[in-house]
Structure formats: structure tokens, C-alpha cells
Amino acid sequence: MKFNLKETLILGSITLIFISSCSNNSEKQISKENDSLKTYVAERLPIYAKVRLTTDIEKLSENERKVLPLLIRAAEIMDELFWMQTYPKRDSLLSAVEDEKTREFIKINYGPWDRLNDNKPFVKGIGDKPLGSGFYPADMTREELEKSDVSDKKGLYSMVQRDKSGKLISIPYSVYFKDELKKAADLLLQAANITEEIQLKKYLTLRAEAFLTDNYIPSDFAWMDMTNSGLDIIIGPIENYEDGLFNARAAFESYVLVKDREWSKRLEKYVAMLPELQRGLPVDAAYKKESPGTSSQLAAFDVVYYAGDGNSGGKTIAVNLPNDEMIQQKKGTRRSQLKNAMRAKFDKIMLPIAAELIDESQQSHLSFDAFFANVMFHEVAHGLGIKSTINGKGFVREALQEQYSWLEEGKADILGLYMVSSLLKKGELEGDIKDYYTTFMAGILRSVRFGAGEAHGKANMLCFNFFNKNGAFERTAKGRYKVNYEKFELAMNDLSREILTLQGNGDKAAVEKVQKEMALVHNDLQSDLDRLSKKGIPVDVIFEQGLSVLGLK
């Protein structure tokens, strides 16, 4: 087909108009998406209250002040490693985002998924968060790995990748993260050479070796024996929450801690009571036949640095480790209460929530001591119950797989409350049971805001719905929650029995059913949680932390 000059000029003008129109439409679409992203971030950033992580540096010895910066520098490397596990394209993502607040929100979430909003993607075109995070190839299915000849399908310390032919292989952390782990090991060895604490020296030396060998058990035992040191560091690949595919692979994290010796001394007596409390659990004998270890430590700390998995999503305010069932059965666990972070959450989040949602007649029963005890005994309660199934299915963790973590958190919630009730009756704990139950109720309302994408959030939803079903509290006409103290204890015992039975049976299908039916937020509760958001009450905290905050830089 041929065109004369006039037709050609007209056609060219139409083409330019069309190209210009497409370009303008594209720019408008991009601008609209950017505005939408900024709006979302502007709404979500305020859910985090900023907290400065400090401690009384004057109480540290000169030697401890030399060691502490090395521990923090090692922890910073765990942060880098966690990014590599959860979102390895961090730098390209951040460089593509111009808005500073959006960049900050990405850093808080360690990626483009909102961890406290059921991992909702908030960057256009990203898609849903992979269940296996970055531990596995994005296109790998559960069935593909199970049918493969990978030797450690559910290994703690390896990354699953594809070789050049596309075949699945596993690469040990000590190989995959070799350079970063060597730097972290060197820092721990430097600290070990400086410290005057013999137990800390042994632990740091063995932990440095573990980074290079993937054998963490010797250092875990050394950490269990470390009871005297004023400084502490939890560091390495530890928790399995990030692996939503198999609940198998461990994510890197760290907490750098300064011991509160006065508070720790007050807590020492409770660990010795674990066997008696185990025998009194409200469940059939077969589900409480194990004997919890009593050589473990219960102590309080100021946390001065969070890193990696521990710094993502809802921030923990107490730690119960090690996770290895063999070590737990031989030695128990160490329960570390992060007192300064706990106090920040109580003041900035718990009290404002209670003022809005707890019945006015019961608000006088809110107390930090009750909050501290509830959180502390939550961690201690991880040592109660059952670690191995009663029917030959192996450890509960192995039997329940990805359903394990959230139910274990639910167990710790409810058995922690059981411990409080039992110790009050024995006269081993001071206070009014109404303080503990009311504060526990406010604690549920705090934690359910973490959402269904987080293990602790699911656990609290289960507790809330179970207690609601059993009349342990009522929602008043004013939209406030009033505890029925008698029914609260009955519901506590019934839920304890149900969770321990599910764990002991290792019945994964039954646990999945409970999660679908009970670990969810109904409309009334959601409307109340929305009220908290409208009031500007934070959901969680983020930290200003590091050497400069401590005055050590």
C-alpha cells in the first residue's frame, strides 16, 4: 500500500499522538502506583513505636566495654545473612525505590512483604511471599523436594539450590555463607581472647567453630553452662519460623545482652519447680511423663542489639533456647527475659490498649510485674509438656512440621498462665490472680494484632477464640472486654489439655483443622483492633540501637 505526502504527514501525526498518549498513560499509571505505595506505607509505618536500646554502661567493667562492641559487630553480620535468606535482592529493591519512608518500611520488614499484615506484598509486581522464603528455589514445590535425592531434605543448616542441570542440591551454611561466617567467627574469637569470663570465652570459641563446621551442639551446651557472665550473645541460625514450607531450616539472628543481676537473682528459684509443675499438668499421664531439665538458667537482661530474624516482624521480649530436643531433655533450656524491651512494650502498647479495650472496672488490675511474669513463664513453659509423641511418630516438631511453631507458642502461652496460677496457690509468687488474668487478657489483645502470618499471632487467636467460646470473658455493650475470673481458669485448663493432646498425638491434620477453625480473627474483634489503629496505638516496636546509641562509638 502506498501513501501520498499529505497522507503520510497525517499518519505520522496520528502515530506521534498515539505514542505520546501511551507514554502519558504509562507515566500516569506509574505515578498512581507510587502514590498508592506511599499511602500504604504512610498508614503502616506508625504502627511501630521507636525505642532506644540502652543500658547502664557504667555498670560494665572496663573489660566488658572492650568485648561488647565486638559482639555487636558480629550481630550486624547476622543481619546481612538473614537478608540473604529472606530476600537476597535487597540492594536492587532498595535502589529502585526513591521514597525514603518506603525504603525504611522495606528494611523493617526485611523485604517487600508486610510481616504484621499477613505478609501482604506492598510493592507492585512482587507477588506473594514464598512459603520457603529464600531457603529454596522459588519454583520448587514441597513434593519436588520430598521426591528428590537431597540428603538433608529438612536440614537445619543448609540452603537448597538447583545445579546447572536444574537438579536440587543442598549447600551447607558454612559453605554457602562462607565469607560472612568467617568474619563473624573472627569477631567472636577476638572477643574470646579479650574477655575475662571463662564461661563466655569457651562459648564464643565454640560458637566461632560452629560457624565454620555447622556443628552447633557443643556451643549450645557451652551456652547452657554460661551462668556467671555479665555479657551474653545469642547468635547464629536458630529459629525455624521463616521456613513456612517445612518449618525446618534455621534463620540467622542475634541478641546482644547485658545481665540484670538483681532481677536474675529473684528468678532463680522457679526452674527447680518444673518437675512438680509438670506432674500437675491438667492432662492424661501419658502426655506428661517426660521430666523437664532443671539445670537451666532463668535470668533477666537488657537487650542492646537485635539482628536478623529476631529483629523482623513482632519483636520478641523473651527467649527460650536451645531448640534442640536432645539438649532440652538433658539440660533443659535457658530462659532470657529482655526486660528493657518488655518495659517499652508495656508502656507504649499494652497500657494504651488496655485503656481502650479492657473494662473500666478491671483496668486497675493491669501491672508490669504481672506482664513480666506472664511473659517469663511463657518462656519457662516451653520446657513443660511433651517433646516426643506418645505413638512413635518421633519428636513433636518432626510430626507437626510447619504446624509446629504456632501451636508450640500457644502451648507456652497457656502453660505459662497455668504456672502463674499454680505458683500463686503455692505461695511462691506474689500478687492477685486478677492482676495476672487481666494483664494476660490485655496481652492477647496486643499479640493478635501481629496477624495470621506470624506464629505468635496465630497462637493468641487460638487462645482468644477458645476463651471466648468458653465464656472466660465477655465483650460488653461498650465494646470492652471483661474477664470472668472463675471461667478463665477453667478455660486455661481445658485449652492446656487440648494442646498437649494434639502435640502428644503428633496429629498434623488435626492441628491444621484447629488452625483453620480457631486461629483467625472474627469481625467483632477486628473492629476493635481497628479502633486501636484509629487511635494511633502502635502494634510493635522498632529500635534505635548500636554503638553510638550506647555511647561506645
Image (cartoon, rainbow, N blue to C red):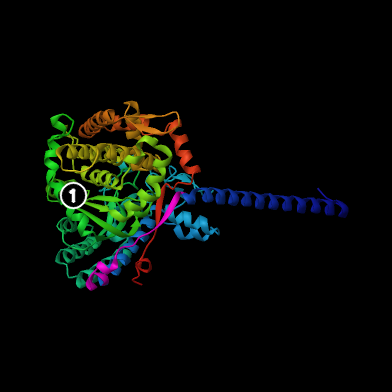
- Quarter of the image holding residue 107? bottom left
In the displayed structure image, the side of residue 197 where residue 316 appears, left or right? right
The amino acid pointed to by label 1 is: Thr
Q: Is residue 291 visible?
A: no
Q: In this view, does 540 lie above or below 301?
A: above
Q: Which residue lies furthest to the top in this view?
A: 470
Q: Position of residue 58 (x, y in %)?
A: 27, 69
Q: Which of 377 and 212 is in front in this view?
A: 377
Secondary element at image label 1: loop
Q: Which of 89 and 376 is in front in this view?
A: 376
Q: Nearer the viewer, residue 143 or 276?
A: 276
Disc 1 target residue: 333
77 shown above or below 495: below
The magenta stretch is 47-65
- Among the 4 quarters of the image, the one containing residue 512: top left
User: Looking at the image, is 245 positioned above or below residue 226?
Assistant: above
Placement of the C terminus among the 4 image quadrants: bottom left
Q: Position of residue 396 (x, y in %)?
A: 22, 38
**For residue 260, side relative to residue 17 (left or right):** left
Label 1 crowd (10 A; few <14 / some 14-19 / many >=20): many
